[in-house]
Amino acid sequence: MEKFIAKSQSSKKILKIAQISSELPVNVIILGQIGVGRKLLSKEILPDAQSYEAKTLEELIINNKINLEELNSVIVYNINKVLNKTEFLEKLEGIKIVATGFIGKEDYFNKFAVKIEILPLDERKEDLDKLKQFYISEAKKIYPSTIVPKDIKIDLSGNGITLKQSIYKSILLKSITKQELMDTLNDFFVREFKVERTYKQLLEVFEIPLLKAAKKVYKSQLQMANKLNINRITLRKKLNKYFGE
């Protein structure tokens, strides 16, 4: 997603403030959790400006490896990671700054005339629905799948970042073939053998998902043992080992 999504009322208001700010000679700070769209919104304000991670820019300034006189405006990501924020902002005096950071009560916030707070995705239903549709569509172009949206498990712990990851993961897992799975395991085991893992250490890679699936499909340990053609005592030991049962 290349542009800031603004389908919810709160996001429409934020986008309008950002668009107005783009025409004004004032500093703007965009606050919110990781993955809510801070970088995308900063580009709505300064689409042509150079952008830097704050820590990187701080090091460039300290080591005199950047000519600040050539900058009229700049986007600074994660300004909260700067060590000496007062000195850092003084060095950027006269340059229009759009910065991103986390919500809080920091002293350096008074250097920004405009403060924008972006809500988490789970509080922006319309934006969330739009992003879900977009990522599902994009994922299906890569991994052909008949999975329906209600069967996709989404993770919003990192907002848009984990939303995208969880959608791609769900669709991949539903579309992967036996051969693709074997190829993936082959690559995984090659990496593990390079750090001298043993067969016994790697056995759980097979057994845990196998037993979890069997628990989901079969109603009892007796049925599991019969269907897996495994001794019930051995099965109980493995269930206790992996799941504490």
Image: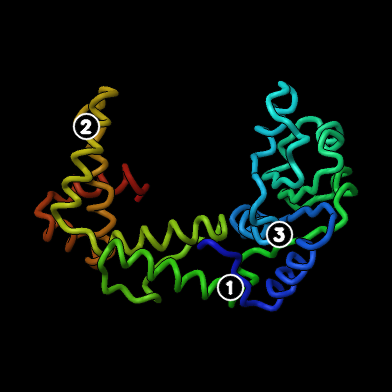
Residue at the spot 19% in from the left edge and 31% down from the top edge: 199
Point out the tag, 2 or 3, that comes first from the N-terminus. Answer: 3
The residue positioned farthest toward the front in the image shown:
70
Name the residue located 55 percent from the left edge and 71 percent from the top edge.
Answer: 128
Q: Where in the figure is residue 214, as x and y percent of width and height? A: 23, 60
User: Which sits earlier in the primary sequence, circle 1 or circle 3?
Assistant: 3
Q: Nearer the viewer, mark 2 or mark 3?
A: 3
Mark 3: which amino acid? Ile
**Relative side of 169 to 21, left or right:** left
Residue drawn at x 17%, y 45% is 183
Residue closest to the eye, 213 or 86? 86
Q: Which residue is drawn at the image coordinates 38% and 60% (left, top)?
A: 168
Using the rendered view, name the quadrant where residue 215 is placed. Answer: bottom left
Mark 1: which secondary structure? helix
- Going by the numbered disc 2, the residue's amino acid type is Val
The residue that disc 2 covers is 190
Cβ atoms under marks 1 and 3 closer than 8 Å: no
Residue 45 is labelled as 3
Question: Between 43 and 30, which is closer to the camera in this rendering?
Answer: 43
Q: Nearer the viewer, mark 1 or mark 2?
A: 1
The vertical placement of 131 against 71, above or below, is: below
**Disc 1 or disc 3, which is closer to the eye?**
3
The residue labelled by disc 1 is 127
Q: Amino acid at mark 1?
A: Asp
What is the number of the mark on residue 182? Answer: none
- Looking at the picture, tell me which residue is in the foreground, 240 or 164: 164
